[in-house]
Image (spheres, rainbow, N blue to C red):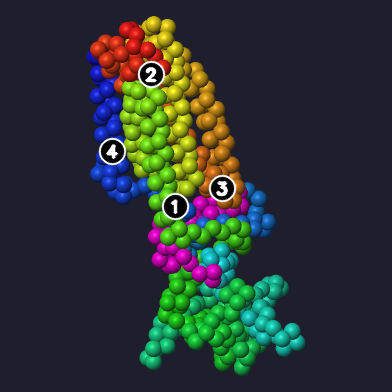
């Protein structure tokens, strides 16, 4: 063994040991202390895609508006007690909300994307329906909503244990409230959340009677302590500058996600074992070397998934498994070229170098085309609704193919060089069963 090859072997072993320390234990590696991030389809959770109505936004300010919407949504999510939510833009007018391992109610989903959370309505006897309570400011008719609340609402209790959501109007809200409550003295003023009435703790709609003109502040009573606290926090989160519409929803239960992980691990172990068995039976010692390189490959990939980090989805696991097959495919090309060189009577050392040289162009070209496809798939995944699985597949396949090129060209070759010049190199049948016992 020459000194250069020995140095490469030591570096490979060092990288392998470091990768193992990052990977094991799987939930928190000894080195880095990181876990593998699982997508919503594996750990369970909710994925919502909202479409923002930017038709009323001044041209050129769309990006700033979307950033503001994301900030408000994040503030509205936090009171729900969600751990590590993700709110990201998708394209020009869409926003993706991912809530891992959590389940929220339909009301909470709608509340996240509502411009004004609460709307005050008066009863129209002719229409026999509750209609928005409106006033006039500077000649413009406006509806009274929580968008006129100052961001300082809070929850209070009276001496008898009653729950009150206290709010204060801003300047415009104060004018609207004065006009409306003056007109509706002695009448009921209902409070709606979207198209549904806000329900009290007793399950009945909240529609208090207007007993006095309200100008500066008011209170909402009848809510449960949890509902009042959550609503207060979300009201203080701010007002959305544009309206949002849910256009996509995916909900996976944590139990189903755990089943996906378990089945994927079982399928992966069986697949890798069968691939290794085939390589060893068909290529003998080169097959053993390829199997060792495959173990190295797996350690490096999992370490990268933790360090980057890569959020692993079910489709991403598919890309990872596919990249394993491509890693083996590169070794097959190399070993077949080696076998051809051995059949010509070359030594193991010469056959190894010639085999890698002849196979390199095919490996390079096939992997480059795969990289191009991965880049296109990743772009598509970031541009379409529900494209997370496509993006996950593309990313894991790209990383997997890149690492497989390294393991096939560097690791496998370095390990094969360990046999050059040794007695075992004289036994060609150890390197391919199709070769006879011919001295080389």
Residue at 59% x, 51% y: name it: 385
Q: Tell which circle, 4 or 2, labels the residue nearer the N-terminal end.
A: 4
User: Which of the marked residues, 4 or 3, is nearer the chain's N terminus?
Assistant: 4
Disc 1: which residue: 260
Q: Which residue is mark 2?
A: 432
On screen, residue 20 versus residue 65, left or right, reads left
Q: Residues within 10 Å of mark 3 (few under 14, many from 20)?
A: some
Measured Cα–Cα span from mark 4 to mark 2: 31 Å
Q: Is residue 169 visible?
A: yes
The Cα atoms of the two marked residues, 1 and 4, are separated by: 24 Å
Helix, strand or loop for disc 2: loop
Single out the mark in the foreground, 4 or 2.
Answer: 2
Q: Which mark is residue 387?
A: 3
Q: Residue at x 54, y 58 (%)?
A: 250
- Residue 242 in sight from this viewpoint: no
The magenta-colored residue range is: 78-107
Q: Residues under labels 3 and 1: Cα distance?
A: 19 Å
């Amino acid at each position: 063994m020459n000194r250069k090859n020995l140095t490469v072997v030591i570096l490979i072993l060092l990288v392998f040991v470091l990768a193992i320390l990052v990977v094991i234990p799987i939930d928190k590696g000894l080195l880095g202390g990181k876990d593998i991030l699982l997508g919503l389809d594996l750990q369970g959770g909710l994925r919502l895609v909202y479409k923002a109505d930017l038709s009323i936004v001044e041209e050129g300010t769309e990006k700033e508006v979307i950033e503001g919407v994301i900030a408000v949504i994040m503030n509205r999510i936090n009171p729900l007690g969600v751990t590590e939510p993700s709110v990201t833009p998708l394209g020009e007018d869409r926003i993706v909300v991912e809530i891992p391992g959590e389940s929220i109610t339909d009301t909470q989903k709608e509340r996240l994307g509502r411009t004004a959370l609460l709307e005050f309505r008066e009863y129209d006897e002719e229409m026999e329906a509750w209609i928005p309570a409106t006033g006039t400011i500077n000649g413009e008719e406006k509806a009274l909503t929580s968008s006129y609340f100052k961001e300082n609402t809070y929850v209070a209790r009276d001496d008898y244990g009653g729950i009150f959501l206290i709010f204060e109007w801003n300047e415009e809200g104060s004018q609207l409230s004065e006009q409306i409550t003056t007109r509706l003295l002695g009448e009921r003023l209902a409070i709606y959340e979207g198209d549904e009435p806000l329900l009290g703790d007793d399950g009945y709609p909240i529609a208090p009677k207007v007993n006095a003109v309200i100008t500066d502040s008011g209170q909402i009573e009848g809510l449960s302590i949890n509902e009042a606290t959550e609503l207060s926090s979300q009201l203080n989160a701010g007002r959305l500058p544009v309206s949002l519409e849910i256009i996509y929803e995916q909900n996976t239960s944590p139990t189903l996600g755990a089943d996906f992980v378990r089945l994927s691990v079982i399928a992966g172990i069986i697949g890798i074992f069968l691939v290794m068995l085939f390589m060893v039976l068909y290529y003998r010692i080169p097959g053993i070397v390829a199997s060792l390189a495959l173990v190295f490959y797996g350690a490096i990939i999992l370490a990268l998934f933790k360090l980057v980090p890569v959020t692993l989805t079910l489709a991403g696991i598919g890309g990872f498994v596919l990249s394993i097959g491509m890693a083996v495919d590169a070794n097959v090309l190399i070993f077949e070229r080696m076998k051809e060189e051995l059949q010509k009577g070359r030594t193991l050392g010469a056959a190894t170098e010639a085999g890698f040289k002849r196979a390199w162009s095919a490996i390079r070209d096939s992997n480059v085309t795969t990289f191009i496809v991965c880049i296109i798939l990743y772009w598509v995944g970031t541009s379409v609704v529900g494209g997370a699985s496509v993006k996950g597949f593309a990313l894991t396949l790209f990383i997997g193919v890149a690492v497989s090129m390294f393991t096939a060209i560097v690791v496998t070759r370095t390990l094969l060089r360990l046999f050059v010049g040794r007695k075992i190199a004289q036994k060609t049948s150890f390197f391919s069963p199709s070769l006879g016992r011919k001295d080389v």
